Amino acid sequence: MHTVPRYGYPVPRVADHEARRRQVAEAVEQLIADDGYDGVTVARTAATAGISVGLVQHYFATKDDMLLHTFTVLRERVERRTMHDAEQAGQAGARIEHILVPALREMLPLDERRRRERRVLQAFAGRAVENPRLAEALRASNAHLEGVLAQAISNGKLCGEVVAAVNEADEAALLLAHVDGLAQLLYFDPERSAAQTALADHIHRLFPGPCHHPRA
Amino acid sequence: MHTVPRYGYPVPRVADHEARRRQVAEAVEQLIADDGYDGVTVARTAATAGISVGLVQHYFATKDDMLLHTFTVLRERVERRTMHDAEQAGQAGARIEHILVPALREMLPLDERRRRERRVLQAFAGRAVENPRLAEALRASNAHLEGVLAQAISNGKLCGEVVAAVNEADEAALLLAHVDGLAQLLYFDPERSAAQTALADHIHRLFPGPCHHPRA
């Protein structure tokens, strides 16, 4: 890093920018997980991230921007993990049904890490009713994931697992709604093991047929 | 009302107590719907309800108590409306399936009144991750509704609509999770008409058989 006097604090190289923003998001996520949404302040975020308040403000003009970015980073991380598993399974030539079940289970709060993630996402979803920008980010994030699921359902039609009459977009939205409802159920009552088989059942009903083309 | 000097404000008759508590709950609900959860203060609640701060404090020792009561009153109202429809249909001898579909649709934000209710419930669900008493109230409220649904599924087994192998408690929880996920989906994207048929499909899968005994 080199110091640019007019900012009065060290300005990182361009390559560091994304990493710094991510570092701030991780600090915000930790604060929400530990102390709740109201526990987030720019000062506490800077302290948690181990950087100056000025540097946090360099990246985020308002606390709201910081929270919005945190939501996006968190959703992207969960999604990336989900898709990583799905790609591995796809390369191994598994049925789409058997790719989707463990992939979407990544969104259920079945261990401490996913419980923390769910806790933070649930807090964001509650605030979204009061915050139009957060509501829009939630809609956009859902729309993206629905697109991925719709593609999986469409692939299922091509290979024979899904019947032709199914509407991909509708079923993708409903599958996501089901996962979300199950995640909330499990968050508040972790002993509900039935939620896991319910997800597999839902996906099995959507992908009942045999797959006719082996995939690479 | 008669004045009890040591309180310094009029104390209502016993019969009024529940009505007053309900009046406070309605004011809190209105404040959350209009201005969000953070807009709730004891002073604003008193002003909205048209009563004194002292009277609000007579009924609720803390703001938290007031919020908790509001959540309970709101959930009970939604549930009572749901059950009212179900009882009417039950008396008319309808299939259980056809009773449950419109009853549970009462929980979906399909008009302005239900959108407001959902907005407030969603705000509460977001806060529940930070507030153990609210989380417990949410769990208790879900458990109660799940009990009602489990009874409906159990009745379905007796009359032939539901297959014997079904686990009532599990299916009741999953049905509620599905309704909740659909409600959130519809709240943030009201154009999703597929959510309504999805609910009917879910219930139809659970109640596929013919009903062998006509009910009174």
Image (cartoon, coloured by chain):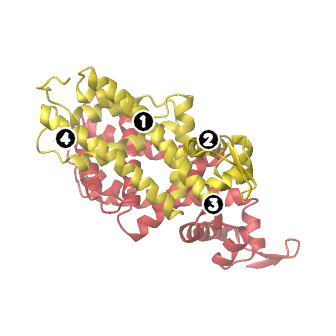
Chain colours: A red, B yellow
Q: Is residue B165 visible?
A: yes
Marker disc for residue B154: 4
Q: Position of residue A22 (x, y in %)?
A: 60, 67
Return the residue at label 1. B80
Q: How many numbered discs, if any?
A: 4
Q: Position of residue B85 (x, y in %)?
A: 37, 27
Quarter of the picture holding the N terminus of chain B? top right
In the image, what residue type sits under mark 1?
Answer: Arg
Dots 1, 2 in contact, CB < 8 A: no
| Image depth: mark 4 or mark 3 in front | 3
Quarter of the picture holding the C terminus of chain B? top left
Q: Do callouts 1 and 4 point to residues on the same chain?
A: yes
Q: Do callouts 3 and 2 point to residues on the same chain?
A: yes
Taking depth in this image into account, of A52 and A113 the one nearest to the observer is A113
Q: Which circle's residue, 3 or 1, is located before the other in the chain?
A: 3
Q: Residue at x 55, y 57 (%)?
A: B127
Return the residue at label 2. B23
Q: Determine crowd level at label 1: few under 14, some 14-19, many 20+ residues with C-alpha closer than 10 A.
A: few
Say if A47 sits above or below B11 in the image: below
Residue at mark 3 to residue at mark 2: CA–CA distance: 16 Å
At mark 1, the secondary structure is helix
In the image, what residue type sits under mark 4?
Answer: Ser
Marker disc for residue B62: 3
Q: Which circle's residue, 4 or 3, is located before the other in the chain?
A: 3
At mark 4, the secondary structure is helix
Badge 4: chain ID: B
Say if B162 sits above or below A185 in the image: above
Badge 2: chain ID: B
Taking depth in this image into account, of A9 and A36 the one nearest to the observer is A36
At mark 3, the secondary structure is loop
